[in-house]
Image: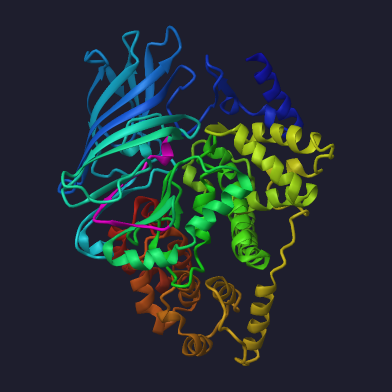
Amino acid sequence: MWRLTWKFWISLAIFSIGYACQTKKNEMKISKDMEIYSNDPHSYSRPEEAVTEHIDLDLKVDFKSKLIAGTATLTISKKPGVNRIFLDTKDLRILDVKNDLGESLKYKLGEEDSILGAALTIDLNGHERKISIRYTTGEQAEALQWLNPEQTADKTDPFLFSQSQAILARSWIPLQDSPGIRCTYNAKVEVPKGMMALMSAENPQEINDSGIYHFSMPQPIPSYLMALAVGKVEFARIGDRTGVYAEPGMLKRSVEEFSEMEDMLMIAEQLYGPYQWGRYDLIVLPPSFPFGGMENPRITFATPTILAGDKSLTSLVAHELAHSWSGNLVTNATWNDFWLNEGFTVYFEYRIMEALKGRDYAEMLSSLSLQGLLDEVDLFMKSGKENATKLKLDLAGANPDDGVTAIAYDKGYFFLRRLEEYVGREKFDEFLNLYFSKHAFKSNHTEAFLVFLKEHLFEKNEIKPIEDLNEWVYDSGLPSSLPAVDSKRFKRVDAAISQWIQNDYAFDVSNWSSHEWVHFIKNLPKDLSAESMQKLDEKFDFTNSGNAEILGVWFVHCSRKLYEPSLEAMSNFLIRTGRRKFLMPVYEELVKSGEGRKIAKEIYAKARPNYHFVASSSLDRLLK
């Protein structure tokens, strides 16, 4: 214990000037079994006193009342003398709490916080190994989205899905909702007959007759990876370990789009070691899903907006697959360390895509990351939010979703690329393989990673550490050592933009992917006239594109100029699409003018029922 604690404080002195002077909220805590817990500002739990090892769920899904009711039985471990355990809840109705002898336990729900919810404090009689909490979800359970049939792709049956990241698992399960705490789980889930239930666990592949499904997740996972989907879906096999779930009308298209999943899985294993989760499946959710994808173990939840028809958007699948190592296998200890999940995953994603489609394809993706990063940093710096551009964040008192920016993803990626270019790919790959194997099924924080980096990359290879290490991790903005990106494909797109500006449309777009079109549209002049937009539309028919990535960037231009021919299509797109990546830029552009704000509010009034809480909470603040 003392050696670990000493090592931690030394790492602070080495890697973070001034960091060691921060308050005790950033200290680690070490339990009796040497498990290291970072003090999580977004959880009421006290795992150094009592921690969850396993959860048994017995749940019933009621579409009529839009509630989940059931029991969560937690197997716990606690230090001697500890007589209570702290759990996280949000808008849950607690009916009773009992121990493994069936004895009722006293409990108290604390005051409700708008971000954190309410602490559930349970008094322990002394020797409990299990506590059972009978409860129902609230009417506004933020993790859950209940969809009517008309809100789905096939429009025949209702649908339910969860989105637990970052701290929304507490709104459908009473548990210790911190990424630094991992546990296994089993579940029994009852749903209406004729529907299938799926979880982040071992899953069925066909609808059964009873409507009762049993699940097992034998690997310990953090709470934000607890996931549930219920709907009329079917399964199709891709490879020996991969497959796709979707509504029947979407299944064939989905199988064709994701036919490379098995290849991606084998490439990932060749890069960074064995896949440790059994199967890797994917479910295509209804369009209201707020993210591109969610890396729930064994089953990625994915948006239908990546069904481009040409597999040009399946790098998202590579991203979620990469999370099976960076995030699911080795997890950020708190949301202040979010870059450890996402920066690593973007790096891994691009390595998969490079192996699958070549270096220039990966450089095209890197170029998009760079452009998004530069834009985000510029926006934060101009708005006085310099601290938001640091890799190591301080989100205490804030919603952890505030850290879901290009900084964690793309600054994190370019930091790792900087390391790779500094020491060479062979040495860096050896380091990453060791990192994933040594930290498998554990949580990690930035300071521990930097210690590991120093010992196993620099010292092991007798290489002097990069001089700007602290600058990358703890300083705002971007270091001057930001790696350069060289995309030959985007250079051809840039040449096409120059031709278009000169009214020369004689450039070849026959082999362009979605990424090239996005780059083309994003880099058009911002002061496009209505006449210019009309010419573009006549030539390329952007307004009627079936590609969500193209529509997302095109409608930003349309919002800026309130381009009349696009307004109806833009309204339909915003109403039927729930992916926050597309929603926020368009709405943000609309509200910059008085007429645009009026249009935005009219659209939002119709669209809001289709949005998950993750999206609607951001838009509520924007349009208040």
Q: Nearer the viewer, residue 272 or 314?
A: 272
* Residue 574 % position (x, y): 37, 68
Taking 72 as reference, is 507 above or below it? below
Image quarter of residue 141: top left
In screen coordinates, is 426 left or right of 168?
A: right
The residue positioned 67% from the left and 84% from the top of the image is: 498
The residue positioned 43% from the left and 58% from the top of the image is: 580
Q: How is the image coloured?
A: rainbow
The residue positioned 53% from the left and 88% from the top of the image is: 532
In screen coordinates, is 408 left or right of 53?
A: right
Image quarter of residue 202: top left
* Residue 425 % position (x, y): 74, 50
* Residue 239 % position (x, y): 44, 56
Extreme residue in the front direction: 240
| Residue 388 in view, yes or no | no
Residue 62 painted magenta: no
Q: Quadrant of the N terminus?
A: top right
* Residue 480 % position (x, y): 78, 54
Taking 576 as reference, is 29 above or below it? above
Q: Quadrant of the C terminus?
A: bottom left
| Residue 148 in view, yes or no | yes
Taking 610 as reference, is 593 above or below it? below
The residue positioned 39% from the left and 74% from the top of the image is: 570
Q: How many labels sit on residues? A: 0
Q: Nearer the viewer, residue 310 or 225?
A: 310
Give, as a single range, the part of the protein colored magenta. Answer: 223-238
Q: Nearer the viewer, residue 98 or 285?
A: 285
